Amino acid sequence: MNFRHIAIGLCFLAAATAGSASEEAVAEKEKSFFDRYASNAQELVLRALSFVGVNYHRGGESPETGFDCSGLVRHVYREALGLSLPRTSRDISRVGETIQTDELKPGDLVFFNTLRRGFSHVGIYLGEHRFVHAPATGGEVRVEDMRQSYWTKRFNGARRIATAEAASTN
């Protein structure tokens, strides 16, 4: 085999590889919103659960220093989707789409009135009425059941942040 045969073979290989890469890109773009959302939601949930046990720290935004509720949500959304959310739970509550409780899907945000003011607490919905959050001083990131009376009395609403736009950025 001479160099000409090798060069021709490499050209065919490069063309085949480029073709499959572009086919993969087209396939990715043709994924339905549901497929993209489901993938992002799974990533959000897995990232959030990876921080269970991290200490609460007021104003905290990292696993090294600890998290407060909005710091946890901001960190997870930034790491999983590359989205930068506002700093406070109240400001985060103004982002995305309002959804009803019966529309909740994993990765959605749930808000509570825990300080005698609306939207003072936020967590990430996991499914099956459960959410992960950084509760309060002395606590650590944990999973709770929204059906507990404490949470049902304080529930303020839910938002969906991982929209088609966010899903397509991944």
Image (tube, helix red, strand yellow):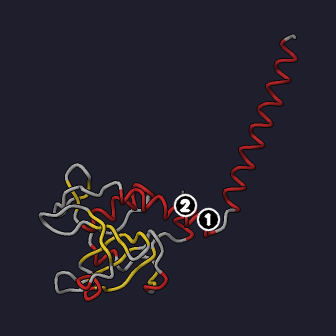
Taking the spot 43% from the left edge, 85% from the top edge, the residue there is: 101
- Residue topped by disc 1: 35
* Amino acid under disc 1: Asp
Question: Which quadrant: the N terminus?
Answer: top right
Do the CB atoms of the residues marked 1 and 2 lie less than 8 Å apart? yes
- Report the side of 153 relative to 130 (left or right): left
- Nearest to the observer: residue 127 or residue 155: 127
Where in the figure is residue 156, as x and y percent of width and height? 31, 86
- Nearest to the observer: residue 165 or residue 159: 159
Where in the figure is residue 63, as x and y percent of width and height? 26, 52
Question: Which quadrant: the C terminus?
Answer: bottom right
Taking the spot 45% from the left edge, 76% from the top edge, the residue there is: 160
- Report the side of 169 relative to 50 (left or right): right
* Amino acid under disc 2: Ser
Residue 119 vertical placement versus 86 (above, below)? below
Where in the figure is residue 155, as x and y percent of width and height? 30, 85
| Quadrant in which residue 7 is drawn | top right
At mark 1, the secondary structure is helix
- Residue topped by disc 2: 39
- Report the side of 170 relative to 108 (left or right): right
Residue 33 vertical placement versus 10 (above, below)? below
| Quadrant in which residue 110 is drawn | bottom left
Residue farthest left in this picture: 138
Q: CA distance from mark 1 to mark 2?
A: 6 Å
Residue farthest bottom in this picture: 153
Taking the spot 17% from the left edge, 86% from the top edge, the residue there is: 116
